C-alpha cells in the first residue's frame, strides 16, 4: 500500500474507534440515521476519498475507498454502507457525467454536505436490472419521470439520487438512461422507509416518481440510451466496496470472538485453550485474510483499468460476503448463548453481514458474471486444444 492509502486507513480507523464504535448499537436499535457519525466522517474528510481533486476531492482510488469502508465496517457494518453508498451514487457522474454535472454535484458530496443514492432496482427488476419499468418520457426539452424504485439505500436521507429509467421502450440495447435527481424536484418523494434486519442505521426506502419533470440537463452525460452500460460500469467499481464492508464486518466479529474466547472460562480453562475453538478461530482469520487480499487485488485492478476488473470485482464481492456470513455466524457460535443476545455485540455483525450477499448484485449473479467472463477467456486457451482427446463424432 502507498503512504496515502495507509493514511486513509489510519484516519478511518480513528473515526471508527472514536465515533462509530460507541454509537453503533444505539443507532442499530433506533434504526435512525447517525448524524454524529456523518459529521465525524465529513470533518475527517473521508467523503473526499474517491472524488478527483478538481471537484473538491482528494483524488484517491477504489483501493483507498475500500480501506476506509473496511475500517468503518469493522466497527459497524451499517456505517460502512452509509459511507460507501455515496460512492455508488456518484460513480455514474464521475464515469459519464458532463463537465457541468461534475462541477455541480461532486464538490457537495466531497465536502459531506450532500448525500447521494443510486436508484436502479425496482419491484420487478432486481437481478434482471435491464427489466426496468420506470419511465422517462421526452417532452420538449424536458423529461417526465414516473415509476417506483425499490430498496433505495440511503434514499430517504439523500439530497441527490442517480436514477435509471426507460427512455426507449422499443430498443433492446439502448432502452435505459440515467438521470440525476434532487430531492426538492417536484414529483420526487420517498414515501416509504423499510424496517430492516441489519444495516439499520442507514435508511432504505421506496422512491416514488410521479410526473417528475426534469430539464434535459439532468440526463447523465447528456446522452440517452447508455444507462444500462453505465449502471454495470458503476457496479464494477462499487462491488469491491461491498466486499470491503464484508471484510470489515468479518474482521470486527473475529476481533470480538477472539477476545471473548480468551476471557470465557469453561471446564476451568479459557475456551481459547480448546482445539475446536482454536480451529474455528484459525479458519475465520485465514478466510478473512484471503478475502481481504482478493478485495485489494480487485480494487487495484479497477484503479489500473485492468480488463479483468468486472470478473475480479464480482469474485471479491461474492467471496468476501460469503466469508463475512460464515465468520459472523461462527462468532455468534463462539459466544454461545450470549452470542444470541442483543446486549452482546456479535449478533449485530451477523445481521449486518446478510445483506452483503444480496445487494449490489446477489452472489448468484456474481458467480454468473465470473462464469461468463471465464467462458470468454476460454478463447485464449487454444494452445491446449491438442492435449484433450475429442472423439471424432463430437468434433
Ligand atoms: N461493463 C460494461 N458494459 C456491460 C457490463 C459491464 N460490466 N456488463 C454488461 N454490459 C453491457 C453488455 O456489453 C451489453 O451491451 P450491448 O447491448 O451493447 O451488447 C449490455 O450491457 C447488456 O449486457 P448483458 O446481456 O450481459 O445483460 P443481462 O441482461 O444478461 O444482465 C447481469 C447482466 C449481470 C445479470 C446484470 O443485469 C446485473 O448485474 N444484475 C444485477 C443487478 C445489480 O447488481 N443490482 C444492484 C442494485 S444496486 C444496489 O443494490 C445498491 C444498494 O442497495 C447499496
Image (tube, rainbow, N blue to C red):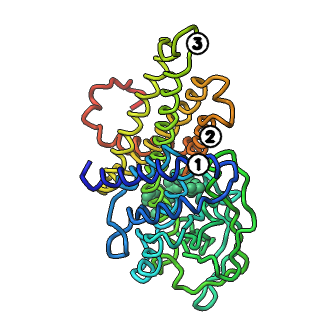
316 left or right, relative to 333? left
Pinpoint residue 28: horizontal percent, then vertical percent.
65, 49
Pinpoint residue 254: horizontal percent, then vertical percent.
49, 31
- Secondary structure of residue under mark 3: strand
Residue that numbered label 1 is attached to: 24
Q: Residue at x 49, y 76 (%)?
A: 220
- Secondary structure of residue under mark 2: helix
1 or 2: mark nearer the eye = 1
Q: Is residue 119 among the parts visible in the rendering?
A: yes
Pinpoint residue 175: horizontal percent, then vertical percent.
57, 69
Q: Residue at x 54, y 42 (%)?
A: 363
Q: Residues within 10 Å of mark 3 (few under 14, many from 20)?
A: few
Q: Residue at x 63, y 23 (%)?
A: 336
Pinpoint residue 96: horizontal percent, then vertical percent.
42, 72
Give the quarter of the image for residue 344: top right
Q: Earlier in the sequence, mark 1 or mark 3?
A: 1
- Secondary structure of residue under mark 1: helix
Q: Are marks 1 and 2 in contact (CB under 8 Å)?
A: yes
119 left or right, relative to 47? right
Residue that numbered label 2 is attached to: 348
Q: Is residue 367 among the parts visible in the rendering?
A: no
Q: Nearer the viewer, residue 189 or 107?
A: 107
Q: Residues within 10 Å of mark 1 (few under 14, many from 20)?
A: many
Separation of residues labelled 1 and 3 (CA atoms) = 30 Å
Residue that numbered label 3 is attached to: 266
Amino acid at each position: 500500500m502507498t503512504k496515502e492509502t495507509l493514511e486513509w486507513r489510519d484516519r478511518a480507523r480513528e473515526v471508527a474507534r472514536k465515533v462509530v464504535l460507541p454509537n453503533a448499537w444505539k443507532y442499530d436499535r433506533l434504526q435512525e440515521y447517525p448524524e454524529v457519525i456523518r459529521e465525524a466522517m465529513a470533518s475527517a474528510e473521508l467523503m473526499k476519498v474517491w472524488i478527483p481533486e478538481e471537484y473538491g476531492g482528494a483524488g484517491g482510488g477504489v483501493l483507498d475507498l475500500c480501506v476506509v469502508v473496511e475500517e468503518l465496517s469493522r466497527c459497524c457494518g451499517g456505517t460502512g454502507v452509509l459511507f460507501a453508498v455515496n460512492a455508488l451514487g456518484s460513480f455514474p457522474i464521475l464515469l459519464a457525467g458532463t463537465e457541468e454535472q461534475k462541477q455541480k454535484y461532486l464538490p457537495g458530496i466531497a465536502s459531506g454536505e450532500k448525500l447521494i443514492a443510486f436508484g436502479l432496482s425496482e419491484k420487478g427488476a432486481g437481478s434482471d436490472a435491464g427489466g426496468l419499468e420506470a419511465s422517462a418520457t421526452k417532452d420538449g426539452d424536458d423529461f417526465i419521470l414516473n415509476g417506483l424504485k425499490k430498496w433505495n439505500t440511503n434514499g430517504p436521507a439523500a439530497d441527490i439520487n442517480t436514477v435509471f429509467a426507460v427512455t426507449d421502450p422499443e430498443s433492446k440495447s439502448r432502452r435505459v438512461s440515467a438521470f440525476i435527481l434532487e430531492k426538492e424536484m417536484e414529483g420526487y418523494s420517498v414515501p416509504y422507509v423499510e424496517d430492516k434486519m441489519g444495516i439499520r442505521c442507514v435508511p432504505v426506502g421506496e422512491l416514488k416518481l410521479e410526473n417528475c419533470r426534469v430539464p434535459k440537463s439532468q440526463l447523465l452525460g447528456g446522452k440517452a440510451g447508455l444507462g444500462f452500460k453505465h449502471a454495470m460500469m458503476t457496479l464494477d467499481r462499487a462491488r469491491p466496496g461491498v466486499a470491503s464492508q464484508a471484510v470489515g464486518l468479518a474482521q470486527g466479529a473475529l476481533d470480538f470472538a477472539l477476545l471473548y474466547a480468551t476471557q470465557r472460562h469453561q471446564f476451568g480453562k479459557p475456551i481459547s485453550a480448546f482445539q475446536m475453538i482454536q480451529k474455528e478461530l484459525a479458519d475465520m482469520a485465514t478466510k478473512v485474510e484471503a478475502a481481504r487480499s482478493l478485495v485489494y487485488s480487485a480494487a487495484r485492478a479497477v484503479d489500473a483499468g485492468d480488463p479483468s476488473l468486472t470478473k475480479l470485482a464480482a469474485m471479491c464481492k461474492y467471496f468476501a460476503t460469503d466469508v463475512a456470513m460464515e465468520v459472523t455466524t461462527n462468532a455468534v457460535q463462539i459466544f454461545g448463548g450470549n452470542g444470541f443476545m442483543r446486549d452482546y455485540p456479535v449478533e449485530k455483525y451477523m445481521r449486518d453481514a446478510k445483506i452483503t450477499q444480496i445487494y449490489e448484485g446477489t452472489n448468484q449473479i456474481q458467480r454468473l458474471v465470473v462464469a461468463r467472463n471465464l467462458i470468454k477467456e476460454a478463447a485464449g486457451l487454444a494452445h491446449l486444444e491438442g492435449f484433450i482427446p475429442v472423439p471424432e463424432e463430437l468434433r
